[in-house]
Amino acid sequence: MKLNMASMALLAASLSSTSSLVCAFTRPANHRGALTTLSKLHFSTKEPTNQPNKNQPAGSIRRRKVLKHNTATLLSRASKFNGYNDGALFSTTEDVSTAMNDANTQQVEEEVENLFPNKGKQISDLPPRMRFAPSPTGSLHVGGARTALYNWLVAKKGQLDFSEGDGAFVLRVEDTDLARSTKESEDSVLADLTWLGLNWDEGPTTPLAKYGPYRQSERSALYTKIANSLIESGKAYPCFCTPEELDAMKAKMEAEGIPPRYDGTWRDADPDLVKAKIEAGDPYTVRFKVPPGARVVIDDAVRGTVSWDAEATVGDFILLRSSGVPVYNFCVAVDDASMGITTVIRAEEHLTNTLRQGLILDALGAPRPRYAHCSLILGEDKQKLSKRHGATSCNQFRLDGFLPDAMINYLALLGWNDGTDNEIFTREELIEAFDIDRIVKSPSVFDMDKLKWVNSQHL
């Protein structure tokens, strides 16, 4: 039975008011919204028996649940669909359910296919879409402020060069570290960026913008949808290894002198066994299936050509934890692709993350952004800048009386120059002069005396 989506919607609406509507499931009151797309959750409509089993209360009717592959719970099934907000779930008849299931699968595939605005385009031909993606686990420090500034400068210059298009400075809050992320930290970071004058075009204060929402904690349905699409296309798979099994696997490899990585136990498991364990409710993670012999190569704007042997380096890595919470690299890759980010400027400590993110982007068929990994900022003792070197947070510099324009000027010089001896710039001059190809590879040293001198020039 083949139905288009409009026909199915009408049929479902009509059946919902008749005896063909078998059941409804509603989340508790503290969950908001309703499912606005037909769900992939279906129940049998065979004539029910009036004989309750021993686990049912008297007078209740037992209905057989038709289990589907790749999903373990109502929540994970429903969250695959665009517009899902924890709400009422409906089912009709089994033949309609089958048609809806096929149509929804096709719809998900089409939605995922259309999620990536840069797909099929040449990144270098597009207006720069830059992003700064802080984790709200503390204050904005010098290193993060410099990263934000470099991205902001490229975006602002791009907006001058491209009068039309989606060029923007995007602020994305990466708050998947549930234990450490706080609203207070997020507010502090946003306040510091505002003080510096690094105003964003899209971000958490513009939730209805084209590519929102801009907090990762608000994008969980998207991550689940894409993880499921990767499973369906054979590029990811459920892994049922217990923590004890993984610890034993790691210990065995270390004893043999092998760099520890997942050994692929569930990579090519029997589909019937996988289905049985899912139906039994066994917890599982979702792992990315690293292609045999895969290598990731990038032309980094700062560090030159960098390459990794993916299979030997990482093995099949986790995308979704057994709790359903997505891991950092999966979120970043999905967000960069779905927000149309063209260039990523970040600290060199993120360089190794590019391997996993590149593999995910390739699997999704989304073009990789251009990367520029900046060297660390050091203290005068040539160690990584930290609190022991004195003030490092933007808020402290504000309280100490430094001017925002002076901070912007000095931060720009920590790893970049315009090829001249000039050291004093206005914002407009920085926007005009900045080029990521002139970011230097060597680390920069934070010099408080130099900052004070720059500040005096802006008084």
Image (spheres, helix red, strand yellow):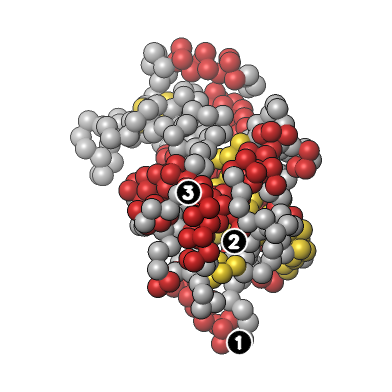
- Which residue is rendered at x = 58% and y = 15% of the image? 6
Q: Nearer the viewer, residue 285 or 266?
A: 285
> Could you tell me which secondary element the residue under label 1 belongs to?
loop
Badge 2 amino acid: Leu
Q: Nearer the viewer, residue 151 or 368?
A: 151
- Which residue is rendered at x = 59% and y = 72% of the image? 261
> Could you tell me which secondary element the residue under label 2 belongs to?
loop
The CA span between labels 3 and 1 is 63 Å
The picture places residue 156, in percent across and down from the top left corner, at 63, 38
Q: What residue sits right under mark 3 in the picture?
A: 459
Please rate how many residues cluster around mark 1, counting C-alpha atoms within 10 Å: few if below 14, some from 14 to 19, many from 20.
few
Instruction: State which quadrant residue 43 falls in.
Output: top left
Q: What residue sits right under mark 1 in the picture?
A: 256
Residue farthest toward the left in the current orientation of the protein: 58
> Could you tell me which secondary element the residue under label 3 belongs to?
loop
Instruction: State which quadrant residue 115 falls in.
Output: top right
Is 446 drawn above or below residue 20 in the view shown?
A: below
Label 3 close to label 1 by CB (< 8 Å): no
Left or right: where 421 falls relative to 274: right
Earlier-in-chain disc, 3 versus 2 = 2
The CA span between labels 3 and 2 is 21 Å
Please rate how many residues cluster around mark 2, counting C-alpha atoms within 10 Å: few if below 14, some from 14 to 19, many from 20.
many
The picture places residue 254, in percent across and down from the top left corner, at 56, 83
Badge 3 amino acid: Leu
Badge 1 amino acid: Glu
Please rate how many residues cluster around mark 3, counting C-alpha atoms within 10 Å: few if below 14, some from 14 to 19, many from 20.
few
Nearer the observer: mark 3 or 2; the answer is 3
Q: Which mark is residue 41?
A: none
Q: What residue sits right under mark 2 in the picture?
A: 414
Left or right: where 243 falls relative to 202: left
